[in-house]
Amino acid sequence: MSLLGNLVSQVARSAMNPEDAQRNPVNQNINPRRTGGLGDILGSVLGGGNQTGGYNPRQYDRQPDNGFGLDDIIGGLTGGNQRGSVNSGAGGLGDILGSVLGGQRTRSGFGGKGMLIAILMPMVLSWIKNNGGVSGALSKITGMGYDNQARSWMSNQEDNDNLDPNDINRLFDENEIQQVAANTGANEVEVRQGLAELLPEVMNQLTPNGNLENEAEANAEIDQIMGQLSNRLNTLK
């Protein structure tokens, strides 16, 4: 069972939606910070629409993947119906992200917020991995003074208390943020806010029981996704 399968599936579906760029365009005015819930950018992606009035996090509960429902996404990428050809399990998620991101390279323009979140997903997973996995990442966050935020990400009872986008530079490299903005057409504020919303949600999904008892599974899944993603993107070069 994949911890991140449902989240990646919804992000991939939004990124592949041809209407995403019109419905959820990048480089738009956004609220500087929404404390609690999924926030404006991630909420619009998972909510399937433009959530200018905010997003109700209760509409998106933690849940395991259900085979991802990614057969239609792969079919859309390859121009055919691949139903039944996608195996469920973490090993396929890197291929999914790789397919989405590789498909973006062939497009004449960039997509909307769904594609932005798809591009930020590997940044977030890499950050967690490079900081010692789930427990190491949480220790770093709490050591920086974000104790309440970290606790909310693991909680089954609280909405995620998202990071302040202005503090994202304390975690992520500024050059990476600028590069994502330059390559996507999003402004740097959107990139920071996307990271500030996505990191809490990923951590939330990786701690389904509100503790670290799934850490070995979570870290192994991150390794699998990043390995699959690297291999997939290398084949598209």
Image (spheres, grey):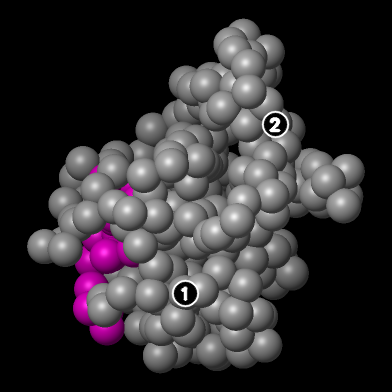
Above or below, 86 against 143 in this view is above
Amino acid type, callout 1:
Ala
Query: Mark 2 sits on what residue?
Result: 92
Q: CA distance from mark 2 to mark 1?
A: 28 Å
**Visible residue check, residue 181:** yes
User: Is 123 colored magenta in this rendering?
Assistant: no
Report the number of numbered marks: 2
Say which residue label 1 marks.
Answer: 186
Q: Nearer the viewer, residue 165 or 76?
A: 76
Does the magenta-highlighted stretch encompass residue 32?
Answer: yes
Which residue sits at x=33%, y=54%? Answer: 22
Residue projecting furthest to the front: 108
Q: Quadrant of residue 77?
A: top right
Q: Nearer the viewer, residue 61 or 92?
A: 92
Q: Secondary structure at mark 2?
A: helix
User: Relative to 74, does residue 234 appear above or below in the rendering?
Assistant: below
